Amino acid sequence: MSSTKVHSTAMVDSNARLGPDVEVGPFSIIGPLVRIAEKTTIQSHVVIEGEVTIGGGNFIGHGAIIGAPPQDVSFSPDRKTRVEIGNNNIIREYCTIHRGNPDGSATRIGDKNFLMAGAHVGHNCAIGNNVVIANNCLLAGHVQVDDGAFLGGGSTFHQFMHIGRLVMVQGSSAFGKDLPPFVLAAERNFVFGLNVIGLRRAGVSEKDRDEIKAAFKLVYLSGLNISQALKKADTISLGAAAREFLGFVAGSKKRGICPFRRGANDEVSG
């Protein structure tokens, strides 16, 4: 038999909707526009305010704040914005996730993500599935993070930038340009190679890995500019994964992609 467990010191608005087997810990506050699906655990001192929808099977750690207004001086409290969180996410202690800024907009987090302690997800970010955001990462507004990316602890990400699928970011790095899928990124706006180990772990075939390497070398190591490299790529037979890399590069016009920098442990082949 299912039941919802709300600690006696928690404040849950009578208009909030909690699904079966939701647990709300001591001193947590849940506002009237919050909807939480089944089997989600909310620990102590959590604040969930504004219009927030949270799926099933999530874990929300001590002191997390979800749905607070965006940190934008242009924001008006009259705007109807929201946070949408999927299923089976782990959101550890003291994470902050702000609701959207433009009227009618949302900050979105998909399924099976792991946000470690102190991570900040700014307004209108879009986080895919199976993403790891390590301790104290800072995501400004409108950052898009695609499936399977790993963002190392203490790293910072500029507003409106895009982080591609299966990107691996070294801790204590900073980025203001886009990171194409499958790359290793570190320091300040640098790509150091391909996330070969991550590609293998994700089950990307050897053929696809080889084609991704060819696309990477064409963009970063051929001596051609981006337009020339993309034009040459059109003459080469490549599969979906390599085309995903090239399509990302072609579409990165607002911020541009991070440049390549050679390092002691470049992972381009292998």
Image (cartoon, rainbow, N blue to C red):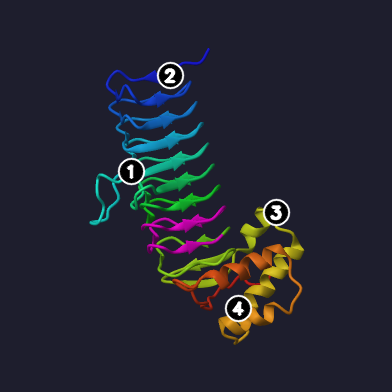
| Span of residues in magenta | 140-164
- For residue 112, above or below residue 146: above
- Toward the top, the furthest residue is 1
Disc 3 to disc 1, C-alpha distance: 41 Å
Front label number (4 vs 3): 4
CB of mark 1 within 8 Å of CB of mark 2?
A: no
* Residue 219 circle label: 4
**Is disc 3 placed on a helix, strand or loop?**
loop
- For residue 96, above or below residue 206: above
Disc 1 to disc 4, C-alpha distance: 42 Å
Looking at the image, tell me whether mark 3 or mark 2 is earlier in sequence order. Answer: 2
Residue at coordinates 50% horizontally, 16% vertically from top-left? Answer: 2
Q: What is the x, y in percent for residue 166?
A: 58, 58
Q: What is the x, y in percent for residue 81?
A: 35, 45
121 to the left or right of 228:
left
Front label number (1 vs 4): 1
| Residue type at the position of mark 3 | Gly
Residue at coordinates 68% horizontally, 63% vertically from top-left? Answer: 241
Q: What is the x, y in percent for residue 197?
A: 63, 60
**Neighbours of disc 1 within 10 Å: few (<14), some (14-19), many (20+):** some
**Neighbours of disc 4 within 10 Å: few (<14), some (14-19), many (20+):** many
| Residue type at the position of mark 4 | Val
Q: What is the x, y in percent for residue 73?
A: 23, 56
- For residue 20, above or below residue 237: above
Looking at the image, tell me whether mark 1 or mark 2 is earlier in sequence order. Answer: 2
Q: Quadrant of residue 53?
A: top left
Residue where numbered disc 2 is placed: 4
CB of mark 4 within 8 Å of CB of mark 3?
A: no
Residue where numbered disc 1 is placed: 80
